[in-house]
């Protein structure tokens, strides 16, 4: 579709060089082949052919976290599910109030992938732990041996829904400032901040964090992202994002890079209306995509799609509902993980008919916070049965979600939350502030 794959490959390669990927953790192998077919012996060619035909080791990691075996098992599992189970597994619901039984009931009855927790759902630390435990128990009662999606916006700064409960971190702009001041130190403190954030969230029962923000802001004209962005410089933002992804991965929590393909140039707020971005494809490629390319190169498990009208790619259609934007993410940037929409209760998409179904048809794997969770579940079930969306598409989406949750459970089991996690988080927050300022 959009003929930019070769240039994006160059961007990604450059990001890995600049960000010092090897100092963070082993990244994708970008080494060129050391031999050619013209110089290979017949026996070597035969061995290569045999190797290529051999079954892939199920323990081989994917480009986004889960192993080949976990992905295969997830696909096999969802193939036997009812439409009700499939529909639930592609929805992350919203709920009202602070009663732990309410989200638990929704997960159990609607087979939801999970729920998103907001400030309105929080009373204190004890209530949060009781709520996440009830949600996890509800998923187990529903016959699932993998954890549910229990997510929260905890970016640092003013978008921190666990304020007063989890450690307070500075806004993500601090990561960019730290990287700009000293690349190596900046990446180190950014990774530590993400690691301790993730561990502290896991200690409270969360499995997902809706962070980091990969948007490259344009400064004062950007009313929505601002200091949530790591930088106005795409290269600096790319380094900060790569470090954050590694930290969250180390913590055994599913991170969510957002808001693809970049909300930093929008001059209106998608919480209220559908912003129109008139940037050319070349401008989007140069300004907005480098941090997302970095995230994917560092094995990001999930990417959140924005609600933007990108006139150069899919005019008059929110990016979260545009097949062309999912093609850009998957075909051109090579992302194979979970694509999740931004909240479907935002003003940018609120007036559209069946926005969740449109997003699923376009390529979304998870539908985040529809206005009416139960009604959205019914709409997706009916669409599966009537052919409004193919069962194959929904199985593909559900399998990705199941696989990433299996990965999260495995990594979390290998990396227990330390008893002094709060002290570590406070120290990491102080270190990030010190490196930034």
Image (tube, rainbow, N blue to C red):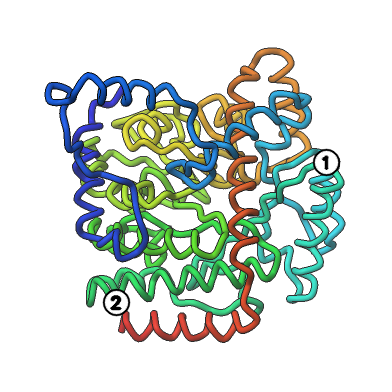
Name the image quarter holding residue 236.
Answer: bottom left
Q: Residue 381 or 307: which is nearer the viewer? A: 381
The residue located at (60%, 41%) in the rendering is 403
Determine whether, in the image, residue 397 is placed left or right of residue 260: right
Which residue is situated farthest in the front direction here? 43
Name the image quarter holding residue 246.
Answer: bottom left
First in sequence, mark 1 or 2: give its number. 1
> Number of callouts in the render?
2
Residue 7: tell me if it is visible. yes
- The residue that mark 2 highlights is 185
Q: Residue 378 or 328: which is nearer the viewer? A: 328
Q: Quadrant of the N terminus?
A: top left
Horizontal and vertical percent for residue 410? 62, 54
Q: Secondary structure at mark 2?
A: helix
Determine whether, in the image, residue 130 is placed left or right of residue 91: right
Which residue is situated farthest in the top direction here? 386
- The residue that mark 1 highlights is 143
The residue located at (64%, 66%) in the rendering is 202
Determine whether, in the image, residue 166 is placed left or right of residue 136: left
Residue 267: tell me if it is visible. no
Q: Secondary structure at mark 1?
A: loop
The residue located at (21%, 45%) in the rendering is 11
The residue located at (84%, 44%) in the rendering is 108
Horizontal and vertical percent for residue 413? 65, 61
Q: Residue 39 or 143: which is nearer the viewer? A: 39
Horizontal and vertical percent for residue 287? 24, 49
Horizontal and vertical percent for residue 206? 66, 61
Vertical arrangement, residue 39 with respect to residue 225, above or below: above
Which residue is situated farthest in the left direction here? 39
Vertical arrangement, residue 282 with respect to residue 425, above or below: above
Vertical arrangement, residue 132 with respect to residue 323, above or below: below
């Amino acid at each position: 579709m959009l003929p930019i794959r070769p240039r994006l490959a160059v961007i990604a390669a450059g990001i890995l060089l600049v960000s010092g990927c090897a100092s963070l953790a082993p990244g994708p192998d970008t080494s060129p082949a050391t031999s050619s077919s013209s110089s290979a012996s017949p026996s070597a060619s035969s061995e290569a052919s045999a190797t290529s035909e051999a079954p892939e080791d199920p323990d081989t990691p994917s480009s986004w976290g889960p192993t080949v075996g976990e992905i295969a098992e997830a696909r096999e599992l969802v193939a036997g599910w009812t439409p009700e189970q499939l529909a639930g597994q592609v929805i992350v619901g919203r709920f009202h109030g602070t009663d732990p039984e309410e989200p638990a009931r929704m997960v159990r009855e609607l087979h939801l992938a999970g729920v998103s927790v907001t400030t309105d759902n929080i009373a204190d630390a004890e209530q949060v732990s009781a709520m996440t435990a009830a949600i996890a128990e509800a998923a187990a009662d529903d016959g699932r041996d993998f954890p549910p999606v229990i997510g929260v916006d905890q970016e640092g700064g003013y978008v921190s829904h666990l304020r007063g409960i989890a450690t307070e971190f500075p806004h993500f702009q601090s990561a960019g400032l730290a990287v700009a001041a000293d690349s190596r130190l900046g990446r180190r403190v950014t990774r530590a901040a993400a690691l301790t954030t993730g561990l502290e969230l896991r200690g409270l029962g969360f499995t997902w964090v809706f962070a980091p923000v990969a948007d490259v802001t344009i400064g004062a004209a950007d009313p929505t992202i601002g200091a949530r962005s790591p930088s106005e410089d795409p290269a600096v933002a790319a380094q900060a994002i790569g470090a954050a992804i590694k930290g969250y991965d180390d913590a055994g929590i599913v991170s969510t890079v957002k808001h693809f393909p970049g909300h930093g140039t929008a001059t209106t707020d998608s919480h209220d209306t559908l912003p129109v971005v008139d940037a050319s494809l070349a401008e989007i490629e140069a300004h907005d995509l480098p941090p997302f390319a970095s995230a994917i190169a560092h094995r990001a498990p999930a990417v959140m799609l924005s609600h933007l009208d990108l006139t150069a790619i899919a005019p008059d259609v929110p990016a979260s509902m545009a097949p062309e934007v999912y093609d850009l993410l998957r075909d051109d940037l090579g992302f194979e993980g979970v694509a999740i929409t931004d909240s479907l209760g935002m003003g940018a998409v609120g007036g559209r008919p069946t926005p969740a179904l449109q997003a699923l048809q376009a390529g979304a794997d998870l539908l985040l916070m529809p206005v009416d969770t139960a009604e959205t579940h019914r709409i997706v079930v009916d669409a599966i049965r009537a052919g409004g969306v193919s069962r194959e598409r929904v199985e593909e989406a559900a399998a990705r979600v199941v696989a990433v949750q299996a990965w999260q459970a495995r990594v979390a089991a290998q990396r227990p939350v330390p008893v002094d996690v709060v002290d570590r988080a406070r120290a990491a927050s102080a270190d990030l502030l010190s490196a930034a300022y």
